[in-house]
Amino acid sequence: RLRPSGLPTEMQRRTGELEALRGGASGLAKKLGGKNLGLLVILLSLLYLPRAMNQCSARIVPARGGQKGYIQRLGCGSGLSITNVVTLSGLAMVLVNSRQFDRHGRSKLKMRMTGAVIMCIGMILIIAHAEPAKVSWYSKSNAYVGLFLEWWGFVSLFYNFTPKFVAQIPRELGKLFNKATGKK
């Protein structure tokens, strides 16, 4: 946004030239940028996700004549679909508005893409197992793994909490323990 500053000069009158706004407005606009709005959208959809999963239902169809029964899926309603669409749109906002590199020269987009892939794997697990989770412990555990992966992917979007980083944690804890006990 531009506004005139002080009395306009003759040149400003002829060309319509304006001076850029200074002050707090630009800082607030940075905070409300596309990436942060995308993260907020994802957070809100993840907070609603357990309720959307709870709306799904299934039943066990009994066996006839010595055959094995099966799980009949009865649907999830629109809650899970809307939540997934909102999550994907938030991911798109975050990835499109990511800076290329951080101050150490690492690719921020690559780190955020890792988080997005982790979230998508979790989303696929939830879509596949949310309905039969009411009647099958196997599906319930897979749906919870999917929920965990979605939260892990969300944390990975704004922090380098990737599988490679997590694999280093036990080694670092071992070093810390050895240092605390005076072994090395």
Image (cartoon, rainbow, N blue to C red):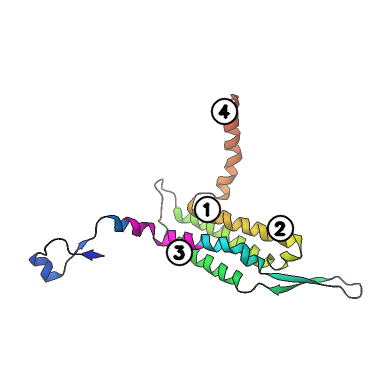
Secondary element type, mark 4: helix
> Which quadrant of the figure has residue 60?
bottom right
Q: Which residue is mark 1?
A: 156
User: Is 118 in front, or is 155?
Assistant: 155
Question: Quick one: which residue is furthest to the right in this view?
Answer: 65
Q: CA distance from mark 2 to mark 4?
A: 38 Å
- State if disc 4 and disc 2 touch (CB < 8 Å): no
- State if disc 2 and disc 1 touch (CB < 8 Å): no
Q: CA distance from mark 3 to mark 4?
A: 43 Å
Q: Which residue is mark 3?
A: 93
Name which residue type carries label 4.
Lys
Q: Which residue is mark 4?
A: 179
- Tell me which residue sits at (73%, 71%) in the image: 58
Q: CA distance from mark 1 to mark 2?
A: 22 Å
Q: Residues within 10 Å of mark 3 (few under 14, many from 20)?
A: many
Name which residue type carries label 3.
Met
Q: Which residue is mark 2?
A: 141
Q: Residues within 10 Å of mark 4 (few under 14, many from 20)?
A: few
- State if disc 1 and disc 3 touch (CB < 8 Å): no
Is residue 26 inside the magenta stretch? Answer: no
Name which residue type carries label 2.
Ser
- Tell me which residue sits at (72%, 62%) in the image: 139
Secondary element type, mark 1: helix
Mark 1 and mark 2 lie on one chain; the one further toward the N terminus is 2
Mark 3 and mark 1 lie on one chain; the one further toward the N terminus is 3
Q: CA distance from mark 2 to mark 3?
A: 30 Å
Secondary element type, mark 3: helix
Which secondary structure type mostly characterizes the magenta part of the structure? helix
